[in-house]
Image: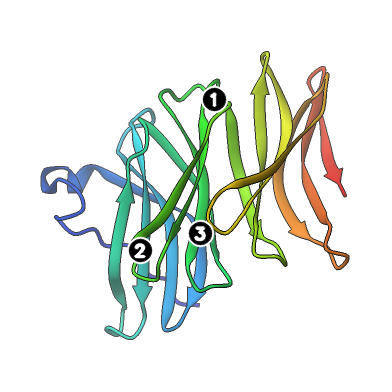
Amino acid sequence: FVRRELIKISENTIDSAKLNDININGKSIIEVDNGYVILASLAESSPIAPSNILLSQFDTNISSNGDTLWTKTWNLDIYDYPKRLIHSSDGSYTFCGYSSDNNTQESGNSWIINTNTNGEQNFLTSISGNNFALDMIENHMGNYIVVGKNLNNNNYQGWLACYDAQGNQLWEKLYGNESIDVFKSINQTKDNGYVVTGETSLNGISKILHLK
């Protein structure tokens, strides 16, 4: 087991006067040749500070301790919440999450971002409608399946949506009615269907939510 502080931020990425007040929290990681690519949240040292998206490639061959090859950031709204990074079948990097102009979880829009292997953006798909993307996979057809929650009339429903390799929406489904339903993880099954898990809550009692 090797412990490393994986992310080093250059002064070109963030105002150098703020470097000592920055929190970087890793959210998702994938292995690539000679290292890793890390999706992280970037924020000032405050519980309510605005946050941005950070993507960085870490190369273990640069030195004995390794170093970052490149770092990219995105500022989509006041509060940006990156959630899941995957290595797409075409070699690109794709990640999802959601953004909001407040930190109350009462409004927000999801997004999918795809980059090349140098972190340069290929596309950004903004998904309106108070959707909160929490997980994503690439299916056997090369489409992206995103799960999370949708806020409608002060009630959360499980949200499941499909996007093609260019980020265009193909379909969208909502699940749940009177209870509070949240999808948190998805996987593809051997029959090319999907299995989803998360949380369902009714009258203050939470249980595991499982959907096939």
Extreme residue in the top direction: 153
Q: Give the number of marks.
A: 3
- Type of amino acid under label 2: Gly
Give the mark, 2 or 3, whose residue is nearer the N terminus. Answer: 3
- Spatial CA distance of label 2 from label 3 is 10 Å
When asked about the image quadrant of residue 198, the answer is: top right
- Type of amino acid under label 1: Gln
Label number found at residue 105: 1
When asked about the image quadrant of residue 101, the answer is: top left
Give the mark, 1 or 3, whose residue is nearer the N terminus. Answer: 3
Please determine whether, in this image, residue 90 is positioned above or below residue 100.
below
- Spatial CA distance of label 1 from label 3 is 24 Å
The local crowd at label 2, few if under 14, some if 14 to 19, many if 20 or more residues have their Cα within 10 Å, is some
Please determine whether, in this image, residue 119 is positioned above or below residue 198.
below
Q: Is the Cβ of the residue at disc 1 closer than 8 Å to that at disc 3?
A: no
- Spatial CA distance of label 1 from label 2 is 28 Å
